[in-house]
Amino acid sequence: MRLLEKSGCKAWVVGFESFDKDNLKQMNKSWSISHHDYDTAVRIIKDHGIMIYGTFVFGYDHDTTDSFDICLDFAQRSN
């Protein structure tokens, strides 16, 4: 992160993909949350002065209509 900041990185596209652990497993991306949760990851990135352009995927087996609300809550909470 220090190197990204030092390089002048101002924004980063982050594929959060899903908030459901089973969906992440299905995507072969369970490593996405193996070190930190998304809130912690956002805080670390922002602490280095880097803006986040977050992307999300909907339509996997474990998504429900609540998946949209969970995503929206996270996006609003994370600014």
Image (cartoon, helix red, strand yellow):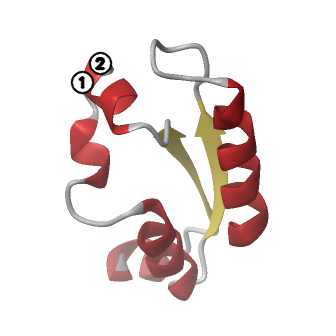
> Label 1 vs label 2: CA separation?
5 Å
Question: Which residue is the site of mark 2?
Answer: 26
Query: In the structure shown, which secondary structural element does the residue marked by tag 2 occupy?
Result: helix
Task: Name the spot of residue 26 as percent of width and height, x first.
Answer: 29, 18
Question: Which residue is the site of mark 1?
Answer: 28
Query: In the structure shown, which secondary structural element does the residue marked by tag 1 occupy?
Result: loop
In this rendering, which labeled residue sits more in front, label 1 or label 2?
Answer: 2
Quarter of the image for residue 20 reads: top left
Pointer 2 local density, CA inside 10 Å: few below 14, some 14–19, many at least 20: few
Any part of residue 23 in sight:
yes
| 54 and 30: which is toward the camera | 30
Any part of residue 79 in sight:
no
Task: Name the kind of residue labelled 2 in the image.
Answer: Gln
Picture layout, residue 76 above or below residue 19? below
Q: Residue at x 66, y 58 (%)?
A: 74
Task: Name the kind of residue labelled 1 in the image.
Answer: Asn
Q: In the rendered view, does 61 fall on the left or right side of 30?
A: right
Q: Quadrant of the C terminus?
A: bottom right
Asked if marks 1 and 2 touch (Cβ < 8 Å), the reply is yes
Q: Quadrant of the N terminus?
A: bottom left
Q: Residue at x 24, y 38 (%)?
A: 30
